[in-house]
Image (cartoon, grey):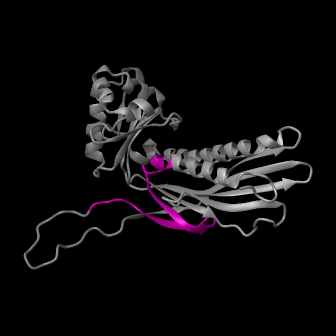
Amino acid sequence: MATTFTNLNTALIDDKIVEALKHVLPLLDMFSHVILADDAITSNVIRVPIATDPGVGDKTAGTFKTTDGSLVATDVTFNKFRAAGWDAVESTLAASQLAAFWADKAAGAVYGVAKDLIDTALALVTATNYGDTSADKKTVAPADFAQMDLADLWAIAQTKIKRQDKVLLLNSAYAGALLGQSTLGLVFATAGNNFIETGKIPSLMGMNVAHYGDMPTNSENLGGAVIGKAAIACAIARPGFFLNSGEGNIVERRVITEPDSGLSAMYTVKADAGGTLSGEVAMLFGVAKAQNAVVRLLTA
């Protein structure tokens, strides 16, 4: 289906953007997060619930256990209004190529903005926020990262991060060292076709394992981290807007949503009479440190 103004394939654009939004969801699940169904504006503050467990104690027959599972939440400010844009210029691109080119650029823009969200959250993983003692970190060079180091990291994380929801996130150097471990080779070899076909690292010692090639060093030689779900709070919303399709030079403006999660991006197309068609994808979000539930993996 094509729009009246631009001959762009609307269905293809929607599919590409939704696919790109799905791509970020596994990484977003590392954090406690809220995705608003309603519009938000910059500087809005929202309470993001943090995953904590009620305590266990003696129960007296005939009485109700004293509750201690009240809401624990972190204030998050929507202070990141981020966007990526692209152009198509007449005489530099054939009209027959426009639909595929445009959908690919839209997907790439969503990947970029969503990655910016993850990068902003990971920028919080510092010594200042999560401690700098032997109970907060493991230091080992990637070339020396072996199964015993993984066990040490797991032991520190088991002590510091109380809940079971945690992810071991590794940069390329540490992930490569892990995949090259002969002692872990049998685990990977028997993990089924999922690992063989996708390269996704299987869960190890109760921790989900993920590779993030652009893991920030944060000027602290950070190469990885065990991140508890309660460590970082994120809030994401679709930006509020009042200019719609057909107003000003806006050819098309709408919110495209991943249906299962509600994660959305604002998609806008504008046209210039000189022959330039411009596209933009935008997201509004904020991040904040929540609980002290990170163990850092450092190169030195």
| Residue at image coords 75%, 60% | 252
The magenta stretch spans which residues?
Answer: 24-53
Nearer to the camera, 145 or 282: 282
Residue 4 location in percent, x, y? 80, 59
| Residue at image coords 55%, 47% | 120
Vertical comparison of 249 with 183: above or below: below
Q: Hey, which quadrant is residue 61 in on the image?
A: bottom left
Nearer to the camera, 256 or 297: 256
Q: Hey, which quadrant is residue 175 in on the image?
A: top left
Vertical comparison of 104 with 271: above or below: above
Vertical comparison of 26 with 60: above or below: above
Residue 265 location in percent, x, y? 62, 57
Left or right? Give the position of 220 relative to 180: right
Picture quarter with the N terminus? bottom right
Q: Determine if residue 80 is in view.
A: no
Residue projecting furthest to the left: 61
Nearer to the camera, 177 or 68: 177
Q: Determine if residue 109 is in view.
A: yes
| Residue at image coords 81%, 67% | 247
Nearer to the camera, 157 or 261: 261
Residue 44 location in percent, x, y? 58, 67
Residue 27 location in percent, x, y? 47, 46
188 inside magenta stretch: no
